[in-house]
Image (spheres, grey):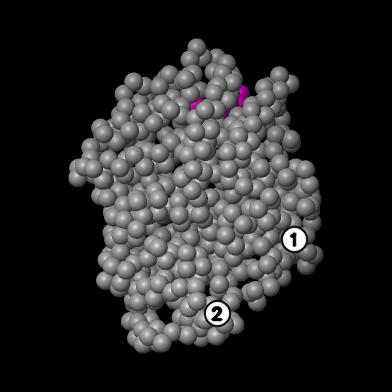
Amino acid sequence: MKLKSVKGLIGSRMLKGPLALGALLSLAVFPEGRASEKLEKYSDSTGNSKGNENNASNEYISEVLDSSKVPTEWNDKYLFSSREDASKELERLKKGPQEIDETFRPKFDNLSGAIVLEYLETEKAYSKSLDVLYTYTYTQLSKNVNESFFISLLGSSQDLLTEYKKAQAFATVKLTSLGKEEWDRLFSEEPKLEAYRAYLEANYIRFAEHRPKNEVQAAYLAELENQRMKLETEALSEITNKVTKAGEITLENGEKFSVNSQSYSTLLSTDPSRKNRKNCYDKRFYHLINESDSMASLYSRKAQLDDLVARELNYTDFYDYSLYNFYLTHDQIENMNTIFKQRKDVFEDYNEFRRKKLGLDVLKPYDLILQLTDQPGKTYAFIDALREILKSYSRMNPHFKEIFLKMVTGSFIDVYPDPEHGKQPGGYCTDLCALKSPALIFMNYDGLIRDQKTLTHEMGHAVNFYLMGNSVDYLYCSGTIYEMEIPSTFNEELFVDHIVENSDRDTAVAILSQQIDDYQNFFTRQPLITEFEYKAHRLCTEKETVSGVELNAIWTDLSKEYRSRSVEYYPEDSAEWTYINHIYLTSNYYTFNYAISKAITLALFKQYREDPDAFNKNYIAYLSAGSTMRPEEKLKEYFGIKIDRQLFEDAMDVVELRIRELYKLAKEE
């Protein structure tokens, strides 16, 4: 459930992708207009507007979401009609770095407000084109990580990005070195520059203490970034082709079963045979250990590069670098981790519920994701999942339905898994703000409860991106990771509440128990991953060569601080870290943002339940504003929320309420 985009690598230091939130203030600044003016209403064949109905009937939903009219693969011909066209665009864009250098280097010797404005608008135009190319290339490679054309094209795009950053070095050095008086002069000289004040603050002004000293260092940093991008690509290929392919097992019925990223989680979620689940779990558990040395070698190279980049920019390490870019403090994250560790026993009542529901003496790791329904193997058709997600928007602003219908009927979702032909595991959403187009969602939909939630999660990103892309200037289509994860995790809460309120008890118990599983994941596993990254980076700084055994030990020791005492884990050190895509991304320390976003989401959901109309007004504004305001200012402005100890305490209180709700539901069966 990652966010993918290139814009953050080009100009913005804030991650651009399924991230960003809103403020109507931005509508007065940028002429694109408010989202309600940009969204086209969905009309039926009679021409009657459907977009503004707050309570779509079941008949209407079925009519619109006819399975024959809902594509299940991307059709991205609007990006590039052919591979040849993409290659031609790459060649055209290769001229950009030199043109930027030749045009603006002389002008920056005598900098004025008008020159800064011209530079920003030129940078924006180039960034949009490169963003589209990168999106096309990355999404196509996700479909088959072994496709040689897209491997080459992605590498070339990354090299082009590196050359562009080198060409920008003179501007980066200059703009990050200016003092307050100089900035005041530039803004006074060119009134139109005021529209970009927040962007300049977020990307240049606030980085005066963390800037490249000169062009030589800036070029060096660009080369390091290129190496980091290449390592990310290599890691995702290794995970898809080797790490998550554990080999074959024999099921109780005598059938051979191939264990890969998709089949593993499907079997553990659906197979009532505990013997099969154990066999599958063991196959991968020991396979990961065997893969840990090679992945440790790759990760060690990446970690050393990460921290080298950070130190070059006057940060202690990349963790320090990340927190600064996320507008977060060490104390905030330490408080969060402390509270989640202190209150992890909140989940013991839930784990006891799971144990009894399964009729077991003790829970083992291969018992933890089995769907808690009378038919654990039950699956849900993609079209039915879409219909339920649409119904879950019944009390949301009409824009949610409008954007949803654009997404599901317009070939913007790639749905089904294909690991044997190189399709990458997991899911993500990537924005197309450069085109003001709906986003692209990447799925591996198997029909399980978790797949439905993944779908609505990514749809939350898509709604956010479309609102943002049609409300603010492209340069503001960005935000911190935790901001971007709020609409996705909020969508999950909407979906769960809808299913619990409108389904039979067995289904309600299954979806609510799965949601509590997710709380356990968000508030224990995700902070654990970040702590693992931190300690692994420290080790990789101290030692030139790090082994899988060493990283496995770090993972296991940390997991003991977070995991449940009611689950009987294996005594061997686990190598689970090897297959976690997020730790290989160039945006390090990604996963604790999930915990922050979920805590904020639970606070938002309380406001939504208390007054849906007032909440929707603020929420649409929040999702539309992008990076026109600092993250903490937006939360306070629209919702009165602060990221502090109380936020995380309140989140765990909600978990307790959800667990009590689960017990009550089960008694009513």
For residue 528, above or below residue 52: above
- Visible residue check, residue 154: yes
Left or right of residue 657, residue 347 in this image: left
Residue for badge 1: 51
Question: Residue 661: image x %, image y %?
Answer: 69, 27
Asked whether 104 or 491 is in front, the reply is 104
Q: Which residue does the image show at 47% across and 64% down from the upper left?
A: 206
Q: Residue furthest front?
A: 181
For residue 327, above or below residue 523: below
Residue for badge 2: 187
Q: Residue furthest top?
A: 361
Left or right of residue 621, residue 418 in this image: left
Residue range in magenta is 368-374
Does the magenta portion include 369? yes
Question: Residue 645: image x %, image y %?
Answer: 58, 38
Q: Amino acid at mark 2?
A: Phe
Identify the secondary structure beneath mark 1. Answer: loop
Q: Tell whether label 2 touches label 1 (CB within 8 Å).
A: no
For residue 465, above or below residue 274: below
Q: Amino acid at mark 1?
A: Gly
Asked whether 295 or 102 is in front, the reply is 102
Left or right of residue 583, residue 658 in this image: right
Please identify the quadrant where the C terminus is shown. top right
Disc 1 to disc 2, C-alpha distance = 41 Å
Q: Splitting the image into 4 quarters, where does residue 603 fall?
A: top right
- Visible residue check, residue 56: no
Identify the secondary structure beneath mark 2. Answer: helix
Q: Which residue does the image show at 52% across and 38% down from the upper left?
A: 336
Per the picture, the main secondary structure of the magenta-coloured stretch is loop
Q: Which residue does the image show at 62% across and 63% down from the upper left?
A: 625
